[in-house]
Amino acid sequence: MEAAGQAGGLAGSAGSAGDGHSLGRLALARGTVDRAADRRGDADWLAAAWRNPLTRVLVVDDGQAVVRFAGEEAELVLIPPAAAPEGTRYLLGVDADAVAYFGVSAPLPGASRGPGASRGPVRSAGLRQAGALLGDRDAGLFTHAVALANWHASHTHCPRCGTPTRSAPGGHSSICPSDGSEHFPRTDPAVIMLVVDPDDRCLLARNQSWPGRRVSILAGFVDPGESAEQAVAREVREETGITVGQIRYLASQPWPMPQSLMLGFRARAEGRQQISVDSEEIAEANWYSREELRASLAADEIRLPPPVSIAHRIIESWYGEELPGSW
């Protein structure tokens, strides 16, 4: 798995240098809307909610939604059900004012997409572009909707018999009309870890597929029958030849591109070891002191993942203050 960008985070206060405890708020781990799981199977309630003109709908297409940008902030463009296009529908939840929210997988209304798309205040955008700029409610709605949309798009047939499935009323499962089996969205656990050496230097690496200056912390998927801590040790050893201990959990964030849950960790290299990259997935890896990282960023020799990434927040928690540089 990529050594970094497969993660998420938000601007927020970081911990003091080296404490590794406070990551601030993570951009895609927010939300204010009750997911209303008890309503997902209530067909009558769902139908009534869809008829209610106060209900709001988020249309998602290939990970994109219509977003209104205003400086360093953004908000989703939500529409009433009567204006929503046809598509796979899923309940996102109900807020404190009893307003229901749905997602719909369909072509986006009122916004162009692709390289020629408008760069104006209202345009299509994905979680990578808008996630850190959205408020808590919208960040939660968008992350939830993208996760469900991706699952419905990629799981269209019954894994038992191959029959095309149909979405359950609330959109959080699918049903096989042939054998009656019910199927639920999958989430792939992945670990992402900051490794420090005995001199408290941070290990940063560049994936083979990344641009030449992009670096981040290591990451990888959890294997079947493996604990998250075991995955941390294995991935670090496989990708850089470094043996680690003192593995401790920091925080988690969903990363539904397409279906991961990023589990953030910190680990310590056992003694002073030579880095030996695998040369297949990792192009290079190096230790950085805080001073060396600051200088490399100032000289634009390296670039870190953006604030929407949990990788950014984990590095920042080690660094001890807001990270300099551009993303």
Image (tube, rainbow, N blue to C red):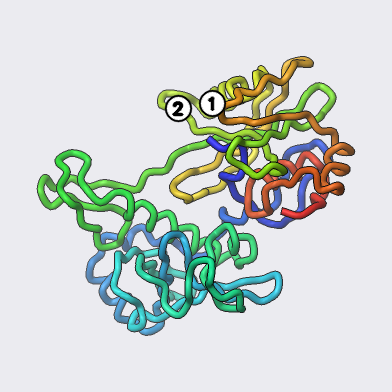
Give me the C-alpha separation between circle 1 and circle 2.
7 Å
Taking depth in this image into account, of 101 and 278 the one nearest to the observer is 278
Query: Could you tell me residue 288's position as x and y percent?
Result: 81, 33
Which is nearer the N-term, disc 1 or disc 2?
2
- Image position, residue 324 (x, y; %): 82, 51
The residue lying at 88 percent from left, 43 percent from top is 295
Horizontal and vertical percent for residue 134? 60, 66
Q: Residue at x 58, y 57 (%)?
A: 128
Which mark is drawn over residue 231? 1
Q: Answer above or below: position of 65 versus 294.
A: below
Name the spot of residue 153 as percent of width and height, x first: 33, 55
- Report which residue position mark 2 lands on: 223
In this rendering, would 105 be left or right of 8? Answer: left
Is disc 1 surrounded by few (<14), some (14 to 19) or many (20+) residues within 10 Å? some
Considering only vertical position in the picture, is 225 above or below 100? above
Q: Residue at x 65, y 18 (%)?
A: 241
Q: What residue type is disc 2 on?
A: Asp
Within the image, what quadrant is residue 233 found in? top right
Is the residue 128 above or below the residue 181 in the image?
below
